[in-house]
Image (cartoon, rainbow, N blue to C red):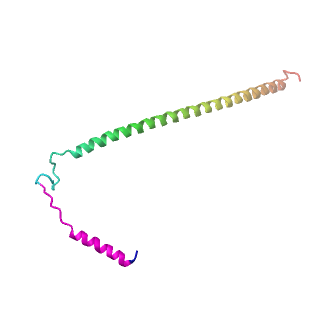
Amino acid sequence: MTLKELQGMIKEELESYMNEEEVDVDVDAGDVDADGAESGDDSEDVLRQIYDMLKDKFEGEGEAEEAEEAEEEAEEADDMDEIDTMEEAKDEDQVEESTTDVHTQLQERFKKLANIVKG
């Protein structure tokens, strides 16, 4: 497309736009509310109700998902606590065994020192 063709198209569109007849719209005094005063239409109230219903619906779903996530986290925490408890029990068993071994060794040493056990 050349510049002359484009200018011709623009000229045609402008002429057709300028030749259009204006549309006469018949409007009564109560049809248009230029002041923004209510004309018996509670559209804001209707929109607020719709918003509130949708908000409740979506927040309800969000709360259900949050509850599920919290439950899963609690289960994971319980599992971790159980693992920690098992590890602590193993550690305590090892400490008791080592304590018992040390205690037995000390008793034997004291007996030797006291010449109770001939060895």
Q: In which quarter of the image is the C terminus?
A: top right
Q: What stretch is highlighted in magenta?
A: 3-27
Q: Residue furthest bottom?
A: 4
Quadrant of res 80? top right
Kindly identify the residue that appears in the image at 29 percent across and 42 percent down: 50
Q: In which quarter of the image is the N terminus?
A: bottom left
Q: In this view, does 115 lie to the left or right of 98?
A: right
Residue 85, horizontal then vertical, whole percent: 61, 30
Residue 32, horizontal then vertical, whole percent: 15, 54
| Residue 16 is one of the magenta-drawn residues | yes
- Whether 8 is drawn above or below 57: the answer is below
Residue 70, horizontal then vertical, whole percent: 48, 35
Taking depth in this image into account, of 72 and 105 the one nearest to the observer is 72
Q: In this view, does 104 lie to the left or right of 6?
A: right
Q: Is residue 28 left or right of residue 117?
A: left
Kindly identify the residue that appears in the image at 41 percent across and 37 percent down: 63
Quadrant of res 81? top right
Taking depth in this image into account, of 66 and 55 the one nearest to the observer is 55
Kindly identify the residue that appears in the image at 33 percent across and 41 percent down: 54
Taking depth in this image into account, of 61 and 13 the one nearest to the observer is 13
Kindly identify the residue that appears in the image at 49 percent across and 33 percent down: 71
Q: Which residue lies furthest to the right in this view?
A: 119
- Magenta segment, prevailing SS (helix, strand or loop): helix
Q: How many marks?
A: 0
| Residue 7 is one of the magenta-drawn residues | yes
- Whether 15 is drawn above or below 62: the answer is below
